[in-house]
Amino acid sequence: MIREFRTGDEAAVYGVCLRTGDSGEDATHLYADPDLLGHVFAGAYLKLCPEFASVVEEEGEVLGYILGAPDTRAFEARCEAEWWPPLRETYPDPENPSTPDERMMRNIHHFAPAPEEIVTGHPSHLHIDLLPQTQGKGYGRRLMDRLRGQLREAGSPGLHLGVSPANRRAIGFYRALGFAVLSESEHVVWMGERLD
């Protein structure tokens, strides 16, 4: 089933984030600190805009999620004020990051804002992750439809996301849902959809 995020789901969401963190594959073996990916890609949404978070639950276990922010620039500002400072006190800022952990720590200290040309027409954004046993069951489409409805109600005219170019399956999924490629580089494919 799909339900709204509840306090107490944080560890499960972090677990899904880690188990899908290698371009959709399990990244558990890549990280010495299993919380780093969750800190960078999930935690702030659960704290700052939990009303736009939903999870997939089967037999009492959270197996997937969608996280959204209606106003990317406002979200980034709140992260800078509320989310990143305590993490920056916990994790060092590596000068020459070489391991996955160090690269995530670098993101904590130097998180790059979304490009202006992406945010201008698509001010909302999302992250969605599903464990393999939930895929092919329609959960992804239903999660996306749920968040789209919430964002429309919040007055958002457009939605964007960034995906690794290596994650071809995800790119195909987003295309099938109506997202178009807005720009791409060797590191990220930006995709978007108008909601108005």
Image (spheres, rainbow, N blue to C red):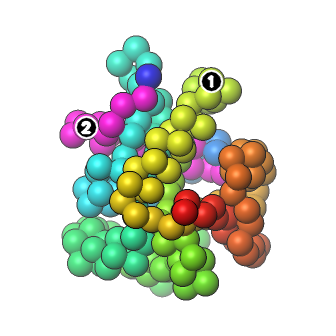
Name the quadrant of the N terminus. top left
Instruction: Give residue 76's position: percent from left, percent from top.
Output: 37, 75
| Label 2 residue SS | loop
Report the front residue among 73 and 33: 73
Report the front residue among 3 and 19: 3
129 in magenta: no
Instruction: Give the residues drawn in magenta, as a range.
Output: 2-23
| Label 1 residue SS | loop
Residue occupying image coordinates x 73% and y 62%: 180
Q: Taking 97 as reference, is 189 left or right? A: right
Type of the residue with mark 1 = Lys
Q: In which quarter of the image is residue 10?
A: top left
Q: Taking 159 as reference, is 75 left or right? A: left
Residue occupying image coordinates x 54% and y 35%: 142
Residue 51's place in the image compared with 70, above or below, is: above
Q: Which of marks 1 and 2 is nearer the N terminus?
A: 2
Q: Do labels 1 and 2 touch, CB within 8 Å?
A: no
Name the quadrant of the C terminus. bottom right
Residue 137: numbered disc: 1
Type of the residue with mark 2 = Arg
Residue 6: numbered disc: 2
